[in-house]
Image (cartoon, rainbow, N blue to C red):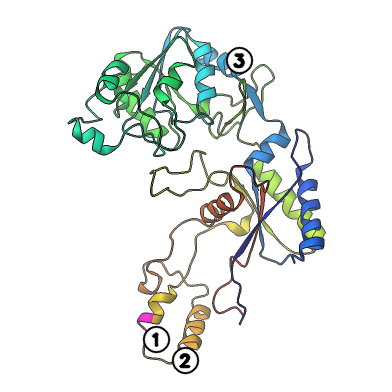
């Protein structure tokens, strides 16, 4: 029996620059891994490439002034509201700076006690202690300070209310979990949430907002020679410098096909490829849900479509085959796994407890955890044995 099942390796590449041929860089990295690390490429292996290096190679950037120009083109220069941005220096601060430059006044409505992805301003216990209802009790900055004082994020040490206010002299902050409360200040609104943006936009529209856009309505085409993303706009963007953001990459579907073809030419094997961003998992201590990108994997090759169709070995071992010897149980479990081929296990007891998620969300999360977001220098991840099972020797 083979001892090693699924394995994932972070592959170190050179620093990727604008206009680099990313397919060629990745192929050279794979060659070096084969030569120096004795890695063997197999049919069914999976290669993940982070969206960050693809966007950088594409030169998909925009400046704060270009964001401001696009905001100005979509609104009058008066007063606009920004509803439910996440609390992030990397993800939203630069966008707010651009929004504030494009109009005369900005009212930013933060949800409390936490943002959409779990970053906490305060805890639910703090809310309960003050007998507040975040959906009905709208707080001004002054009211919030009188109740809670200065509140710093447990991991970053940033007071996001003060930080966001510092990004423009025309910015004010209010706090409420009901998006409709922004209409007491202005009827022109940017719904800045990520995964709940459609619901927020609908609620504001039904409540009478005059103009509503979401972050994926901004920078969908070049503005003053900027980068752009026709699908996601500013969603998935990251801070590059104090005056520039890197956008989510374009043409990811074209890239994964080219990458797969190049890997076949290199190895003679069919390797599945995905572009990945943030993983979809939650920190049990801080409550942060990692996924600040609009999707985990913006593109992937066809072999990664679908969801796992697995049996729960623990269930089989503890139930159907509990009275068998170890060797008899092993053979019976292997036979059960082989027999499941082509049969959907949804709703069956022997599949209870398996993970009901898309392959690409599981794989993208694995890639994100392996590569990290800091200084590991491994923006490419090779996963092997992912589609193996206990019955494959």
Of 250 and 98, nearer the camera is 98
Whether 24 is drawn above or below 303: the answer is: above
Total residue callouts? 3
Horizontal relation, residue 229 to residue 286: left or right: right
Identify the image quadrant of the C terminus. Answer: bottom right
Contact check, label 1 and label 2, Cβ < 8 Å: yes
Residue 98 lies, in percent from the top left, at: 54, 17
Which residue has dot 3 on it? 65
Boundaries of the magenta span: 318-322
- Against 128, residue 192 (above or below) is above
Q: Which residue is the site of mark 1? A: 321
The one nearer the camera, 142 or 191, is: 142
Tell me the CA gap for discs 1 and 3.
66 Å
How far apart are the alpha carbons under marks 2 and 3? Answer: 69 Å
- Regarding residue 207, the answer to whether it shows in the image is no
Looking at the image, is mark 1 or mark 2 earlier in the sequence?
1
Of pointers 2 and 3, the one earlier in the residue sequence:
3
Q: Which residue is mark 2?
A: 328
């Amino acid at each position: 029996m083979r001892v090693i099942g699924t394995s994932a390796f972070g592959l170190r590449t050179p620093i990727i620059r604008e206009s680099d041929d990313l397919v060629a860089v990745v192929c050279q990295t794979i060659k070096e891994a084969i030569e120096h690390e004795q890695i063997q490429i197999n049919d069914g292996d999976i290669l993940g490439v982070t969206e960050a290096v693809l966007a950088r190679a594409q030169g998909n950037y925009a400046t704060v002034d270009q964001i401001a120009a696009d905001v100005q083109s979509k609104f009058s220069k008066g007063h606009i509201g920004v509803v439910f941005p996440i609390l992030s220096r990397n993800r939203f601060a630069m966008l707010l700076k651009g929004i504030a430059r494009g109009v005369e006044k900005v009212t930013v409505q933060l949800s409390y006690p936490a943002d959409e992805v779990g970053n906490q301003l305060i805890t639910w216990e703090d809310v309960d202690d003050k007998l507040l209802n975040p959906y009905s009790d709208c707080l001004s900055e002054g009211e919030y300070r009188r109740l809670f004082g200065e509140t710093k994020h447990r991991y970053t040490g940033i007071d996001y209310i003060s930080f966001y206010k510092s990004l423009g002299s025309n910015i004010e902050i209010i706090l409420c979990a009901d998006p409709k409360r922004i209409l007491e200040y202005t009827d022109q609104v940017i719904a800045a949430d990520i995964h709940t943006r459609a619901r927020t936009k609908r609620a504001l529209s039904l409540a009478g907002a005059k103009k509503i856009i979401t972050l994926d309505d901004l920078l969908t085409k070049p503005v003053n020679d900027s980068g752009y993303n026709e699908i996601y706009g500013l969603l998935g963007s990251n801070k590059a410098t104090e005056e520039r953001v890197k956008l989510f990459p374009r043409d990811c579907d074209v890239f994964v096909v080219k990458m797969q073809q190049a890997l076949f030419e290199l190895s003679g094997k069919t390797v599945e490829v995905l572009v990945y961003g943030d993983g979809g998992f939650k920190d049990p201590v801080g409550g942060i849900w990692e996924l600040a990108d609009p999707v985990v994997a913006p593109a992937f090759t066809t072999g990664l479509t679908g969801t796992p169709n697995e049996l729960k070995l623990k269930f089989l071992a503890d139930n159907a085959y509990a009275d068998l010897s170890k060797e008899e149980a092993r053979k019976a479990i292997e036979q059960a796994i082989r027999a499941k081929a082509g049969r959907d296990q949804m709703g069956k007891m022997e599949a209870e407890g398996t993970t009901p998620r898309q392959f690409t969300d599981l794989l993208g999360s694995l890639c994100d955890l392996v590569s990290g977001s800091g200084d590991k220098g491994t923006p490419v991840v090779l996963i092997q044995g992912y589609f193996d099972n206990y019955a494959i020797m």
